[in-house]
Every structure is written in C-alpha cells, then in structure tokens.
Amino acid sequence: CMILGTVTAVGGGTLRDVLVLGRRPFWSDGEPEYFSMSLAAAALAFFLWPTLEDLGCTTDDMWIFFADAVGVGAFCVIGAKNGLKNAMHPIICMACGVMTATFGGLVRDTLAKRPARILHSH
C-alpha cells in the first residue's frame, strides 16, 4: 500500500522530469519532503479506509471521483508550470501537465496488474 501510494504520488512528476525535461528526479535535488508527504498520505488512506467502509463508503462513491478529478487537475497545473519554468514550448508544457497528472496512476495500475483506471470510467 505504501509503495503503490508513493509511486502514484511521485511517478508522474518523476517521469516528466526524466523523460521530457531532461532533469534528474526531484529526490536527487534534496527535496525528500515529497516522499514524506506521499508516505504520510498513503498511511492515512490505509488506516482510515476501513473506518470509511464501515460508514458505507465504497470506491465507486461520487466524492471519490470528485476528489480524484480535483487531484488530477491540480497535478496537471503543477506539471504544466514545471514546463513553463523550464522555458518549454506550450505544447510541451501541456504534455508535462498530462504526464504529471496521469502517469503516476498508470505506473500504479501496471504494478498492481490492473487495467489503467484513467483510461476508463469503471
């Protein structure tokens, strides 16, 4: 759970940095707080989810999809901003946004041997 949560959180940005921007991954620049935050969020989700299930929540609840959409949008903006900070062409900046927002989940689903959730609604 912790590995998949961390891969999901940092995978898209890492792939963006290495493949598109030609930079070393963020953790090599002395920013370990990204790992700390993703590990804390994964642990919180792991321990909080059973309580939410007891309250009747499922992975198909609308608030889950809403929270996921907000997260995808926020990471897309962060990724595009990183492209702009590196003086990339606007098309490349859009690609940076898409990679940052979606590739972490694609890597997670691949590691978990599941269909890529971003590519279908259910």
Image (spheres, grey):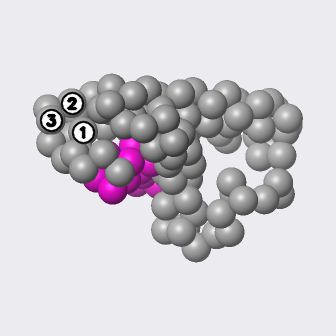
Q: Residue 98: x and y, percent? A: 55, 44
| Classed neighbour count for the residue bearing mark 2: other residues with Cα under 10 Å, few (<14), some (14–19), many (≥20) | few
Residue under label 1: 26
Q: Residue furthest front?
A: 89
Q: CA distance from mark 1 to mark 3?
A: 5 Å
User: Image height check: is 15 above or below 45?
Assistant: below
Query: Is mark 1 in CB contact (under 8 Å) with mark 3?
Result: yes
Q: Position of residue 122 (x, y in %)?
A: 83, 57
Near mark 1 (Cα within 10 A), the count class, few <14, some 14-19 or many ≥20, is: some
Give amino acid for label 1: Phe
Q: Mark 2 touching mark 1, by CB under 8 A?
A: yes
Magenta includes 115? no
Q: Quadrant of residue 101?
A: top right
Frontmost of labels 2 and 3 is 3
Residue drawn where x is 82% and y is 54% of the image: 121
Give the amino acid at mark 3: Asp
Q: Residue at x 62, y 36 (%)?
A: 72
Would residue 82 be seen by someone viewing this image from the given angle? no
Instruction: Specify whether 10 is left or right of 44.
Output: left
SS class of the residue under badge 1? helix
Q: Are marks 2 and 3 in contact (CB under 8 Å)?
A: yes
Residue 82 image label: none
Residue annotated with mark 3? 29
Residue 57: x and y, percent?
Answer: 81, 37
